[in-house]
Image (cartoon, coloured by chain):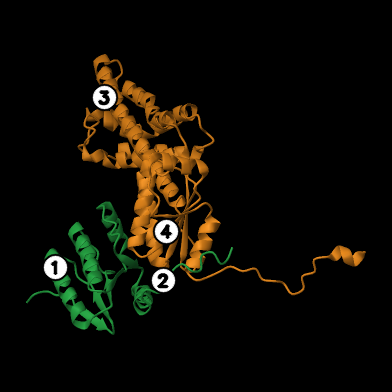
Chain colours: A orange, B green
């Protein structure tokens, strides 16, 4: 059957031209990709098929000779995934090669109906496998995008800020689950070590709900910080959350709690022997109205 | 030769720096040595630096707690300093919050704590600055 492959090699230019014509009508999202880029990708893929080493056949998709083609398609579909193409649009890129290959097979076989049938089956099979491979790679690429975004969100959502020399704060925003709490705990403890902080304020103003699991995670974090020699202050507990905590029977008695972050900060300053005072300005005139009268 | 963790004496205090991975026997030896030393030199404070300790299990955790309690019985305050985040997380996950142990961030603040508690015993100057300012 390798005569089909050699026919493809011989008619490479014709196939490319025909395929590009199909592609241009098939690919809908012309705003996302230019003619030039499409052309380069098509000729690259065709080259990967035509320049496959001797001994590779269209029947055997798992042949190592197809490895470059697969790799090329994998990067192509991964980039399509990030560009914002839909899976079917990505698969269409490969599928639109079919008609061009059919016409080559037809030219080759002439009136040999059996041979043409066999070739058609072969081309169908090969292109379908290719397009499945493309879809797989597309999904893989999109998975990676999602994973990266999750990671970034995780990092964004747990910033540890230094309020003062020796006082760090962790403003928590959003729902806490086990995975996130793990990150929160680690980054807080890490920050305590790095900044040599004796006080850590955990502010949960932005946490919408606190259930037993979240409370347990918070308590673990606080205990771990204590073991390291830092004191934790919990702040920003909203009235509803306070009610929930008591109804759930969570014991927060060993934890210092403050209603606002500012109160917690003041306590931390006090405990570290500091105090914030107002400076009286010397030239402060309070009654400009009287002067005019 | 048997492995031992050195116990240094600085005035009234004993300083223990754990720089190797603790195994059970070593921990028990330390417990023996330390209690002996405390009564020998009549120490008032014990500082255990575990900043190089990277692996901890429930036995080591319990031994640390025991050492602290024993020292308390012998009239010495114990402070454990420099616990690594990973060790702290492990202990918490093991359910050991070590409520009886006093902790500090580093040797410096640990010494500060010892000086405060040991030189001025029973003075109770902890919470006198609570309600003076508002």
Residue at 43%, 52% (x, y): give it: A155
The reply, left or right, for residue A98 in relation to residue B68 is right
Image marks 1 and 3: residues in contact by CB distance under 8 Å: no
For the view shown, which residue lies furthest in the left direction?
B1
Q: Which mark is residue A232?
A: 4
Name the chain letter of the residue that bears numbered label 2: B
Within 10 angstroms of label 4, few (less than 14), some, or many (20 or more) residues?
Answer: many
Within 10 Å of disc 3 (Cα), the crowding (few <14, some 14-19, many 20+) is some
Do pointers 3 and 2 mark residues of a single chain? Answer: no
Disc 4 to disc 3, C-alpha distance: 69 Å
Mark 2 secondary-structure assignment: loop
Disc 1 designates what residue? B28
| SS of the residue under disc 4 | strand
Is A113 positioned to the left or the right of A81 in the image? left
Mark 4 falls within which chain? A
Query: In the depicted view, which residue is nearer to us: A154 or A238?
Result: A238
The mark closer to the camera, 3 or 2, is 2
Which of disc 3 and disc 4 is earlier in sequence?
3
Q: Using the image, tell me which numbered label, if any, was put on residue A122.
A: 3
The answer to whether residue A40 is visible is no
- Chain letter of disc 1 in the image: B
Q: Which residue is mark 2?
A: B124
């Amino acid at each position: 059957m390798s005569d089909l492959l050699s026919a493809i090699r011989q008619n490479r230019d014709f196939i490319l031209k025909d395929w590009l014509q199909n592609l241009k009508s098939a690919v809908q999202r012309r705003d996302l990709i230019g003619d030039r880029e499409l052309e380069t990708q098509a000729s690259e893929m065709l080259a990967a098929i035509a320049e496959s080493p001797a001994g590779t056949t269209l029947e055997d998709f798992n042949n190592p000779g197809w490895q470059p083609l697969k790799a090329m398609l994998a990067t192509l579909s991964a980039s399509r995934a990030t560009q914002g193409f839909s899976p079917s649009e990505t698969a269409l890129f490969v599928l639109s090669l079919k008609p061009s290959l059919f016409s080559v097979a037809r030219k080759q076989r002439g009136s040999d109906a059996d041979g043409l049938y066999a070739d058609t089956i072969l081309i169908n099979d090969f292109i379908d496998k290719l397009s499945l491979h493309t879809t797989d790679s597309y999904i893989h690429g999109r998975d990676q995008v999602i994973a990266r975004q999750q990671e970034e969100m995780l990092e964004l959502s747990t910033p540890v800020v230094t309020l003062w020399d020796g006082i760090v704060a962790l403003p928590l925003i959003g729902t806490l689950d086990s995975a996130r709490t793990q990150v929160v705990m680690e980054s807080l403890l890490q920050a305590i070590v790095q900044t040599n902080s004796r006080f850590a304020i955990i502010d949960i103003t932005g946490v919408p709900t606190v259930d037993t699991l979240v409370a347990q995670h918070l308590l673990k974090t606080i205990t771990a910080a204590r073991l390291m020699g830092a004191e934790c202050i919990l702040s920003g507990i909203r009235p509803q959350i306070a009610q929930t905590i008591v109804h759930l029977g969570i014991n927060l008695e060993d934890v210092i709690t403050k209603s606002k972050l500012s109160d917690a900060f003041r306590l931390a300053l006090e405990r570290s022997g500091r105090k914030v005072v107002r400076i009286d300005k010397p030239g402060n005139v309070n009654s400009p109205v009287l002067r005019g009268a | 030769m048997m492995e031992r963790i050195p116990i240094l004496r600085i005035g009234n205090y004993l300083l223990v720096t754990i720089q190797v991975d603790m195994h059970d026997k070593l921990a028990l030896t330390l417990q023996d040595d330390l209690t002996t030393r405390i009564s020998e030199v009549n120490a008032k404070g014990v500082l255990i630096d575990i900043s190089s300790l990277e692996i901890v299990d429930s036995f080591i955790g319990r031994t640390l707690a025991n050492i602290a309690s024993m020292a308390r019985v012998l009239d010495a305050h114990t402070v454990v300093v420099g616990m690594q985040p990973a060790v702290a997380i492990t202990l918490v996950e093991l359910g050991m919050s070590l409520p009886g142990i006093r902790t500090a961030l580093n040797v410096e603040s640990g010494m500060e704590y010892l000086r405060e508690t040991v030189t001025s015993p029973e003075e109770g100057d902890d919470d006198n600055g609570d309600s003076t300012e508002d």
